[in-house]
Amino acid sequence: MEAVPARARVYIACVAIAALLCLLPLPGVRTPWWAVALLAALYAGCERVARSRFVGISHPAGTFYPVLLAGAFLLPAPAAALVVVPGALLSQVAQRPVALRRVWRAAQLVLGVWAAAEVHRLLGGRDAVVAGDVPYALGPAGAAVLAFCLVLALLDGGILAVAERVPVRRAWRGLVARSLAPIAVHGLAGLMMAVLWRSPYGPVSALLVLLPMCVSWWAFAQYHRERAAHQATIRALVQAVDIKDGYTRGHSERVGQASMMIARELGMADERVEVLRFAGILHDVGKLGVPTRLLRKDGPLTPEERRVIELHPEYGHEMVRGIGFLGEARAAVLHHHERLDGSGYPYGLMGRQIPESARVVAVADAFDAMTSTRSYSRARPVSVALAELERCAGSQFDPVMVAALVEAVGRTGWHPAVTADDKEPRPPRVPPPGTRLSSRPGTHR
């Protein structure tokens, strides 16, 4: 079972208690219970489909909001919040602890739907829905959707700050902006459901609104399924590199993790953080084009052999240039061995000529190289490696990237691993002539 910090459990317990308080007035609320049951069953069914083989992967939205928002537009706030509970508590959860994640999701949505229903009621939206006055109903419905989005973003930011120790100034950054547009579309569908539900045609006609939503939802899920296939291809490439160069097994994944830590510390958007993670993972993929005998050679490399190995960034760039969603990761693969003083390779770029993504990966790559045991060097303590990066900042590494890594590691820590895959010790491999990791922490194969 994955460890959940005690502070995160306390936070989730507080949110769950707040959700229960929202449901307490139910016995005294005049509610069409058949409508609550129908909407709850519909939502639970949509949750089940979202994680079925029909979709192929868990839908990125995580839930089917039109049904929940239709409940907020049709029912009193406690009853609308109750619609969430069965589907959220019975939904499939891929990560552990399952029960805690279900409780968290249910409590979060209960509070969001309750807030949306209350805002909608206070602005007179329910009368507009009953009268079928769609133009007037748009205002209260929009305010309700905004309230729903704000509550979810507030709670999501809180769990990031508490469970993952994300700085408060960054925990909520961009959450509302990223989620408002898709939730607004779901809110419009929910409003159409509510208006049709109250029309002479009844609930059956309201269900027809879900058909086009389900089609678009399924198509969007297929896009993410295709993206998952691309990621599987990336993992296969990395595994091939690990098999070919056993001394650096796991190195690519750790460089991806360190690159992601730097990107987050710099406040980059989540989409760009993910691209930089891919950049770190793929930075050495060009080693597939380097003869295995050179990668595993025990002894110093000749200048010609060194030049062959230094071609691996260009090989890697050619391998990934056709993967469209990688974006600037391709530039990082090509330029991660450039140095700020212009003495790097393959093109000897200087300073800001080096793409930002490459400057991120260069620091992450050197950091993992220094904190991992290699055939020709023992792992250095994290503090020593960070001090070495700081010493080389400005000549070899971008000082901004170094400072970001130092800050991130200081807050979350770093757990280096031995990258050599052999169980039996092998003869130490002599570093190439002139290689001094103390002065050039990024020099490695």
Image: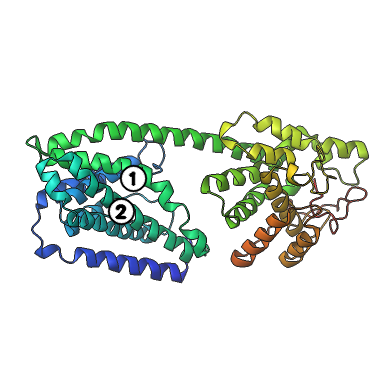
> Could you tell me which residue is drawn at 15 percent across and 65 percent down?
25
Name the residue nearer the viewer: 139 or 188: 139
Vertical order, 173 against 276 (above or below): below
Q: Which mark is residue 148?
A: 2
Which quadrant of the figure has residue 383? bottom right
Residue 88 as seen in the image, left or right of residue 290: left
How far apart are the alpha carbons under marks 1 and 2?
A: 9 Å
Residue 358 point in image, percent of width and height: 70, 44
* Residue assigned mark 1: 183
Q: Name the element at disc 2.
A: helix
> Could you tell me which residue is drawn at 27 percent across and 64 percent down?
19
Which quadrant of the figure has residue 320? top right
Q: Name the element at disc 1.
A: helix
Residue 231 point in image, percent of width and height: 55, 38
For the question of whether residue 54 can be seen, the reply is no
Name the residue nearer the viewer: 309 or 23: 23
The reply to whether dot 1 and dot 2 touch (C-beta < 8 Å) is yes
Q: Name the amino acid, label 1.
A: Ile
Residue 326 point in image, percent of width and height: 59, 37
Residue 192 point in image, percent of width and height: 20, 38
| Image quarter in which the C terminus is found | top right
Which color scheme does this rendered protein use? rainbow
Q: Residues within 10 Å of mark 2 (few under 14, many from 20)?
A: many
Q: Residues within 10 Å of mark 1 (few under 14, many from 20)?
A: many
For the question of whether residue 284 can be seen, the reply is yes
> Could you tell me which residue is drawn at 62 percent across and 62 percent down?
408
Q: Name the amino acid, label 2.
A: Phe
Name the residue nearer the viewer: 182 or 110: 182
Number of numbered discs overlaid on the protein picture? 2
> Could you tell me which residue is drawn at 14 percent across and 50 percent down?
126
Vertical order, 204 against 265 (above or below): above
